[in-house]
Image (spheres, rainbow, N blue to C red):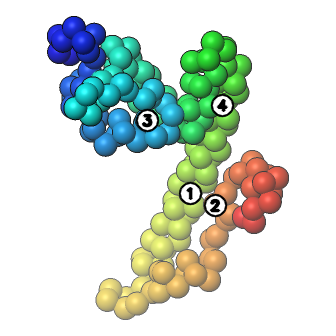
Amino acid sequence: MHDNADDKALWRIGELAKAAGVSPDTLRHYERKGVLRKPTRSANGYRGYAPESLDRVRLVRRALAVGFTLDELSEVLKVRDQGGAPCRRVRELASEKLASVETQLADIKALRDELRTTLKAWDARLTGSTPGAPVRLLEALASGENHRPLRSAKTRRNLKRRGIKS
């Protein structure tokens, strides 16, 4: 931060970006999405971010890392900035993130199992073939040999509930 009595120790965009480990473009994007308050402007047009802006950017970065979207953060931070307590909404959103991760994990495990089965079948084909002769491994995928659905039952239910074909 720079010390100018008129700026009240405001961050310039480059300083804030560097301190937060993001680009100035990211800060501008956060402003547009409503997760970072609009900065004041000096007479020469430079942005001046409040001292607490660094904490806000760090909060946004961490929330993004655990799966929140900028739109979700904009929603809850707007409520919070207006004096509200969006804690239950934040909890609800985090619960949805966890459910999504659980579903993704089940899907990844199903894919892992499918690949293990496929590799065993392919190894058997290769073992029983003449070296250099085609055994059509990829065609076996297309024909559905040894195929099980890759999506978990829970994923299929969630997709069906949302009207998406699996």
**Quadrant of the rendering where the N terminus is positioned:** top left
Name the residue at the front extreme: 43
Distance of mark 4 from mark 2, alpha carbons?
A: 26 Å
Helix, strand or loop under label 1: helix
- Residue where numbered disc 3 is placed: 31
Q: Nearer the viewer, mark 3 or mark 2?
A: 3
In x, y percent, where is residue 68?
55, 35
Residue 17 visible in the shown view = no
Q: Residue at x 47, y 80 (%)?
A: 137
- Residue where numbered disc 4 is placed: 93
- Residue where numbered disc 1 is placed: 111
Residue 54 visible in the shown view = yes
In x, y percent, where is residue 147?
64, 70
Distance of mark 1 from mark 4, alpha carbons?
A: 27 Å
Q: Residue at x 37, y 91 (%)?
A: 133
What number is the disc on residue 150? 2
Residue 8 lies, with reference to residue 28, above or below; the image says above
Query: Which amino acid type corresponds to the residue marked 2 in the rendered image?
Result: Leu
Residue 25 lies, with reference to residue 86, above or below; the image says below
